[in-house]
Image (cartoon, rainbow, N blue to C red):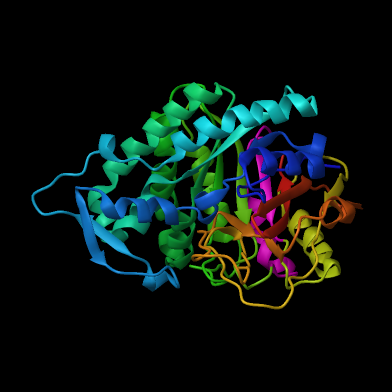
Amino acid sequence: MRDAHLVGSLPGSTPGAAMATALDVLGPSLRSLPDGETGERRNWVVSVVEGLRTHPDLELRRQGDWSDYDRTPQLKPRKGRRLYGASLDFGHVAAVSESFPQFEAVRTAAGRPDLVFQEGVPGDFDLAMFTLGPAGALRHRRPFTEATLGEIRDVRTITGTQTLFQIEVPAELVLLAKAPAAARPALARLLARSVTGLPAAAPEGTRFAVHLCLGDMNNRALGTMTDVGPLVQLANAIVRSWPVGRDLDLIHAPFAAANQPATTDAAFYAPLRQLRIPAAVRFAAGFAHESQSLADQRGSAPASTTSSSGRSSSPRPVDWAGAPRSPAGPSWNAPQSSARTEHRSRDSAGPMFRLSRKQSVSGISGRLRPQSVSGLLGPLTCETPCPRFSLEVSLVRRVHRTKVIGEGD
């Protein structure tokens, strides 16, 4: 079995229960482990934005219920007040203070002293955009940058220097995908500098993953791609502008987009020949989707691998997984990434919102069944040189999302 990478939310009443379940299912294939983002954090930035409604320096510009991209609440700085990063609390440090001791206990019980704690970090511009709107984010990004950097430092103090911080950035890839082709090279460089600004200002030695996304709110993507060209341009630009002294462990690539499964058309993946990622950086290719059969999802893997810029001189085995289809019923899908789909239970309260943080994800409502993940693994061999592929699973409360990732090295 290849390595597995969990991208965020896990099912469980507590962080400890969520992490224990993940280890029961995936065990030694995990290199890092998130705390499950249980409770109100399961909906990515929704709880953060809702918590800022009462901030003394902010006021409501527009009401919203998170039912669509144009129906999100929007705040603005109060007249005569100035917003400072030191006054913003996104709640992540307090959550980690509670969950990290549980992580240590679960890691010890599993006999995995090598397992690394993983912390999801919404991009500073993305969080500012979903709080203040695009124009507000451009004018008032700095406090969100300062607050995010403060949280990275504080979390690292609690969890140690080996912690993997996963930067989650849907806005940048969507902006690039919507831009005219002629403008993309220059825009990719600009957006890459926006993404790498956080690691550049973080303490030296901090480890990062970059989770590129297309958005998935209520099973609708914020943007789509006609091929993976924009993704390749942005990933290459991020690598070129990556700061010295900060490790880049992984880049995630969305091949599916909300209700649109990954295509099996090889032409869509052809730009992967131009992907230029160092051997030490894993490439996570998310394309599992609940609307596709397992056979079709297996068909997507060769298309992406043979189009990718493999650095191996011989065929490699490809391990991957699919997932059962979701049962019928109402669903709310949170925006977040390789196309992440979330299905809302009839008894769950509040909107299920996640912004493109787990693209190309397969959502399955119901109890976690280990066989729905590990039981679907099977070896597949590339007929041409190809990068390693491995299983990526995102499990959310009342929701299972499974996706396949590739590791280009």
The x, y position of residue 22, in whole percent, is 74, 43
Residue at 52 percent of width and 65 percent of height? 349
Relative height, residue 403 to residue 3 (above, below): below
Relative height, residue 66 to residue 388 (above, below): below
Relative height, residue 264 to residue 143 (above, below): below
Q: Is residue 307 shown left or right of residue 65?
A: right
Whether residue 161 appears in magenta in the rendering, the answer is: no
Q: Is residue 297 shown left or right of residue 222?
A: right
Position of the C terminus, as image quadrant, is top right
Q: Which residues are magenta?
A: 262-287
The x, y position of residue 247, in whole percent, is 56, 29
Residue 387 visible in the snapshot: no
The residue closer to the viewer here, 145 or 45, is: 45
The x, y position of residue 402, in whole percent, is 73, 56
Residue at 48 percent of width and 67 percent of height? 222
Residue at the far left in the pictured view: 80
Q: Is residue 384 shown left or right of residue 350?
A: right
Task: Name the image quarter holding residue 146.
Answer: top left
The residue closer to the viewer here, 249 or 46, is: 46
Position of the N terminus, as image quadrant, is top right
Task: Name the image quarter holding residue 112.
Answer: top right
The residue closer to the viewer here, 119 or 227, is: 119
Whether residue 278 appears in magenta in the rendering, the answer is: yes
The x, y position of residue 316, in whole percent, is 86, 44
